Image: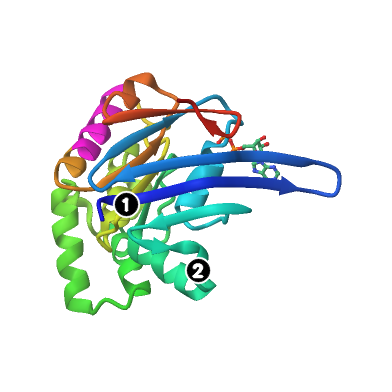
Amino acid sequence: MSESIQLRNICKIYRTEVVETTALQHLDLTVKKGEFIALMGPSGCGKTTLLNILGLIDVPNSGSYHLDGHDTGTLSSNDIVSLRRANIGFVFQHFNLLAELTVEENVELPMIYQGVGKTNRKETVSRLLEQLKIDHRGKHLPSLLSGGQQQRVAIARALANNPAVLLADEPTGNLDHDTSVEILNILSELKQSGATIVMVTHSQHDAEYADSIVEMLDGKIQK
Ligand code: ADP
């Protein structure tokens, strides 16, 4: 099984009392293990919807989604939560760290949800903070860190449960150019060490760090 992500014929329609919006139409996407793709397209073309479906925080109206060999359409909502916690790491534009927790505690939290024992948690926190070169800030609150440092912590947190897929939603959207390059280099290094990455970006420069660029328009992938 070399596919990390396999979407087939995905449709997503948002319905309110007055309007119906087709956000994704008959979308197919395959991402292989160890592949890094950049998802691009104009505002409203369905990138966020697609990322939410990939991240198991939303479900399509039709079509199939296999994540790391699991047919997500056949799973109970409890199994979906477990699959998400074990297999998906999220990185956001606004970092989304918990302000009242230290850097170490932020990175530890997904492992607490996952039932990982304390000794293993502490070891993983140390290893990830060292890998992301942010270990000297472990006891600090996120508000004391620069944007680039906060994003390093967010990436460490996303990696805590060794996920099958890392989903990054405009991870450099709040960073200056030099810091963006640092974060993109980190994503490239993660890819080199086997991570599967889907990154939404508006930046052609950022997208060029990926193996391939997937262009979306009107809820579809452009061939
Ligand atoms: P993008 O991330 O590329 O800007 P989105 O996935 O956010 O695109 O949106 C795709 C389409 O679905 C847009 O037309 C948007 O207005 C619509 N949409 C997104 N979320 C909702 C929602 N919760 N309710 C209704 N329509 C939505």
Question: Which quadrant would the N terminus be assigned to in this image?
Answer: bottom left
Residue drawn at x 86%, y 44% as measured from the top left = 18
Query: Relative to 82, is 52 on the left or the right?
Result: right
Q: Is residue 101 visible?
A: no
Could you give the CA–CA distance between mark 2 and mark 1, rounded to whole angstroms? Answer: 17 Å
Q: Quadrant of the C terminus?
A: top left
Residue 200 or residue 32, whichever sits in front: 32
Q: Quadrant of ligand 1?
A: top right
40, above or below 132, in the image:
above
Q: According to the image, label 1 marks what residue?
A: 4
Q: Residue at x 32, y 39 (%)?
A: 146
**Circle 2 residues within 10 Å: few <14, some 14–19, many ≥20:** few
Which quadrant of the figure has residue 177? top left
Which stretch did the figure color magenta? 177-188
Q: Residue 121 vs residue 168: left or right?
A: left
Amino acid type, mark 1: Ser
Residue 47 visible from this viewpoint: yes
Q: Residue furthest top?
A: 204
Q: Which residue is mark 2?
A: 74
User: Furthest residue to the right?
Assistant: 18
